[in-house]
Amino acid sequence: MDAPIFDPRAFRLSPLEADLTTRAREFGARVLAPRAARWDREATFPMDNYRDMHREGWLGVCIPTADGGLGADFRAYCLTAAELGRYCGATALTWNMHVCSTLWTGVLTDDLEMPADVRAQHHARRLVHYKRILEDGAIYSQPFSEGGAAAAGTIAFGTTATKVEGGWTINGKKIFASLAGHADFYGVLCTDVTDGTSSRRNTLYMAVPATAPGVTVEGEWDPLGMRGTVSRNLLFKDVFVPDDAALMPGGLYFQAASRWPHMFMTLTPTYMGLAQAAYDFTVRYLRGEQPGTPPVKRRMYPTKQIAVAEMRVMLEQTKALWFQAISEACADPGRDSMLRALAAQHTVMENANSLAAKAVRTCGGQSMLKSLPLERIYRDSRCGSLMLPWTAEICIDRLGRETLYERGETDE
Ligand SMILES: Cc1cc2nc3c(=O)[nH]c(=O)nc-3n(C[C@H](O)[C@H](O)[C@H](O)COP(=O)(O)OP(=O)(O)OC[C@H]3O[C@@H](n4cnc5c(N)ncnc54)[C@H](O)[C@@H]3O)c2cc1C
């Protein structure tokens, strides 16, 4: 087995984290790695992986143990997901969308404020979703991108929900909706416009059944990387969902996004795993130990040794900052924690691709053949810095502004 990305002793992992990451590493190597090339080549959704993930409990990784899940908190999830991303980026990224429907409704909302009766209703409702996941293997997705400024968090979502008798009517369009056509429920972020206004404070998070009348999937999915995510367009035309489709009580998503900002870091573990995978490949290749290649050693050349040393420096820097940032995740983080989260997000997303590019340059022409995983890792890693709401550009934009200006400060 590969060595852990975060050694339990060195990084002082909790027993649960040590157990989950070990199992994820074993699962990734055994189940995900052998199939990864297929999803990528065909741009098809890794359904076989999801069946196996259901069988082995991974769909409920963040469902509380009291409700039958594995009980991972934010950090335990991130560390576990990084191990899966190491073996199949597309599976880890789509699994992240699914897991967020349980992490955000679970440990994250437990940290937020709501009246006791609202909390009791929320717990009763989330249990319905958790049961579907654990018992039936239901898969949830998380479409929030719309092609405008909403996914960056600056304006209200254009997808709307209007209150009707016994539920809501949903209308709108989502783009880049990973798992489109394969998820059983789409965890849609939309704006309650019942009173005629459109405000981010009125964001709702609704589980829309894929089979509900008025839900359609359209468009092609033939991208550069992460081809197995099948992120097509989703259309909602007068879709009725009952009241208990709410994954969070009204107003809670806005509170979560404002008070628990690390929730947006959940896209990084996949890319932390890909960064490690690019490094692992390079070491194996230069030692003449990469399966599928002749046992030719290239490690004796000083240029190779320098390249690997530089990659190790970058990998250690990436791991250290990311580990610190995910360890700090909590409600109402301080200003430095917030800035560190943005710096970590930027670092992981950019460095994963830098490491993959360096791996190709260092290992050489034979290493970028499609018969080897590095070529896919290189393409998949390119997608990380494009993920809203914290793209690499937005991280830089916010880091500069929020470092130089205190909250509410202007130059007037
Ligand atoms: C493989 C993959 C899977 C995905 N899966 C999902 C999914 O499951 N669900 C989902 O909701 N989305 C998903 N996305 C979508 C992703 O989050 C983006 O919405 C998507 O990349 C489209 O971005 P865009 O080109 O429309 O961005 P645009 O909004 O056009 O922005 C272009 C660039 O401009 C910059 N920018 C945008 N707004 C601002 C701002 N306010 N300030 C400063 N800079 C800004 C950003 O750097 C951004 O990258 C996925 C994307 C990929 C690549």
Image (cartoon, rainbow, N blue to C red):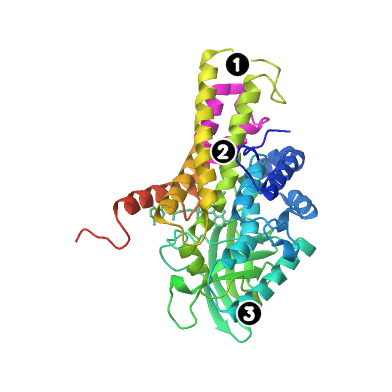
Q: Amino acid at mark 2?
A: Arg
Task: Give the camera-side residue of 321 and 160.
Answer: 321
Disc number placed over residue 243 in the picture, else none: 3
Q: Furthest-left residue in view? A: 412
* Residue at image point 68% right, 75% down: 124
Residue wearing tag 2: 379
Task: Give the camera-side residue of 316 and 55.
Answer: 316
The earlier-in-sequence mark between 2 and 3 is 3
Q: Furthest-bottom residue in view? A: 165
Of the residues tagged 1 and 3, which is closer to the observer?
A: 1
Q: Amino acid at mark 1?
A: Arg
Specify few, some or many for label 1: CA neighbours under 10 Å numbering under 14, 14-19, or 20 or more: some
Task: Give the camera-side residue of 286 and 114.
Answer: 114
The percent position of residue 392, horizontal first and vertical second, equals: 44, 46
Q: Amino acid at mark 3?
A: Asp
The reply to whether discs 2 and 3 touch (Cβ–Cβ < 8 Å) is: no
Disc number placed over residue 299 in the picture, else none: 1
Q: Is residue 375 visible?
A: no
Q: Is residue 388 visible?
A: yes
Specify few, some or many for label 2: CA neighbours under 10 Å numbering under 14, 14-19, or 20 or more: some
Q: Which residues are magenta?
A: 352-381
Q: Is mark 1 within 8 Å of ligand 1?
A: no
